[in-house]
Image: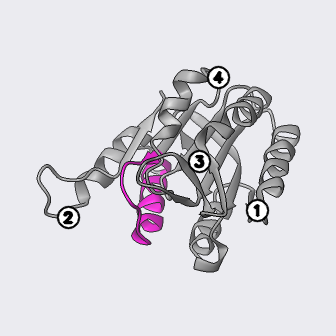
Amino acid sequence: MILFSQIITNIIIIDFLPELNLASELEEYCKSQAPTTLISPEDEQDFLNILKIIAKGAPEEGVLIHLLAHGNIDRSYFGKNSDFKFPWSIFGEPLTAINQKCGGRLIINASLTCYSEPLMFLKYAHRDIYHAAIFSTTERSPQAIMQNINIYNKCINSDSVVSAITQENDAISDGSEPPIRPFAYIGC
């Protein structure tokens, strides 16, 4: 799979919401594209340890990290619930370490996390945090899994990820004016 001009050789799905069973279809699809690992953190320390393990074991090739979590409307945190949550800034150091380990080829997809635009602002604070990111500007729904798979299929069929995101946003019509464009990206 090629995303943002990077060949993805390793996919990691971090699922804070395993009880919702959102990751199974995504995991199945990702496994058909590259070696895929599904991880569900048990608590805050487990999540921090997972990021350290990813940083130590990241290949020197393209890595895609998918984040499935709740976000909040004021965009201050992500996680499982009000007792198990993190400020977005916690990603600064660990993602930078992972990106450096994989030669600047880290792609983050948080489009399955509500209101995940803070990833964009982290790029300004930590220039080398990732190569590119896909995020959500709205509350996400279960249909977002299929929308992600549509984006990936378009990329496999030689569309650019930017074009694929634009096409998927164009296909979504909720009747609002101006129309909601739930997928956004930062990167090449």
> Gap between marks 4 and 1, in whole Å?
25 Å
Front position among marks 3 and 1: 1
* Residue range highlighted in magenta: 135-156
Depicted 144 relative to depicted 125: above or below: below
> Gap between marks 2 and 3, in whole Å?
30 Å
Instruction: First in sequence, mark 2 or 3: give its number.
Output: 3
Front position among marks 4 and 1: 1
Element type at mark 4: loop
Is mark 2 in CB contact (under 8 Å) with mark 3? no
Instruction: First in sequence, mark 4 or 2: give its number.
Output: 4
Q: Quadrant of residue 144?
A: bottom left
Q: Residues within 10 Å of mark 4 (few under 14, many from 20)?
A: some
> Gap between marks 4 and 3, in whole Å?
22 Å
Q: Check residue 174 in the rendering and tell me which mark sits there, or answer none.
A: 2
Instruction: First in sequence, mark 3 or 1: give its number.
Output: 3
Mark 3, residue position = 1
Mark 1, residue position = 41
> Gap between marks 2 and 1, in whole Å?
34 Å
| Residue 22 picture location, percent across and down | 56, 73
Q: Identify residue type, mark 1.
A: Pro
Mark 4, residue position = 128
| Left or right of 56 on screen, residue 98 | left
Magenta stretch, main secondary structure, is helix
Instruction: First in sequence, mark 4 or 3: give its number.
Output: 3
Front position among marks 2 and 1: 1
Q: Identify residue type, mark 3.
A: Met
